Image (cartoon, helix red, strand yellow):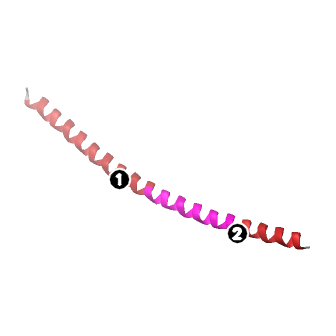
């Protein structure tokens, strides 16, 4: 194998390794963002369920007042 071909192969392997490292970093960033978004989703769901519970309480108290009247 000529020195030039070996140098080209070495360059391509180096580029492939660099690309893999960048993809690993990007995948880790995406995992972190996914975890953050899941946490945010759970927080919104918790808050929404709290609001729905308040509406149910309000409806329940209105129904109780209407049946008393």
The kind of secondary structure the magenta stretch mainly shows is helix
Horizontally, is 14 left or right of 47 in the view?
Answer: left
Horizontally, is 31 left or right of 15 in the view?
Answer: right
Res. 11 image quadrant: top left
Give the x, y percent position of residue 17. 23, 43
Horizontally, is 9 left or right of 61 in the view?
Answer: left
Q: Give whichever of 40, 51 is nearer the camera.
A: 51
Give the x, y percent position of residue 16. 24, 39
Identified at 24% across, 41% down, the residue is 15
Identified at 46% across, 60% down, the residue is 36
Judged from the image, the secondary structure of the residue bearing numbered disc 1 is helix
Mark 2 → mark 1, Cα distance in angstroms: 39 Å
As drawn, 26 above or below 44: above
* Highlighted range, magenta: 35-55
Give the x, y percent position of residue 8. 17, 33
Q: Is residue 23 magenta?
A: no
Identified at 20% across, 41% down, the residue is 14
Q: Earlier in the sequence, mark 2 or mark 1?
A: 1
Q: Give whichever of 69, 28 is nearer the camera.
A: 69
Judged from the image, the secondary structure of the residue bearing numbered disc 2 is helix
Q: Residues within 10 Å of mark 2 (few under 14, many from 20)?
A: few
The residue pinned by badge 2 equals: 54
Give the x, y percent position of residue 39. 49, 61
The residue pinned by badge 1 equals: 28
Identified at 21% across, 36% down, the residue is 12
**In the picture, which quadrant includes the N terminus?**
top left
């Amino acid at each position: 194998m000529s020195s030039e071909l070996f140098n080209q192969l070495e360059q391509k392997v180096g580029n492939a390794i660099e690309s893999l490292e960048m993809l690993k970093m990007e995948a880790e960033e995406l995992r972190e963002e996914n975890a953050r978004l899941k946490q945010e989703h759970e927080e919104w769901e918790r808050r929404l369920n709290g609001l729905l519970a308040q509406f149910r309480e309000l409806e329940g108290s209105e129904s109780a007042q209407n049946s008393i009247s």
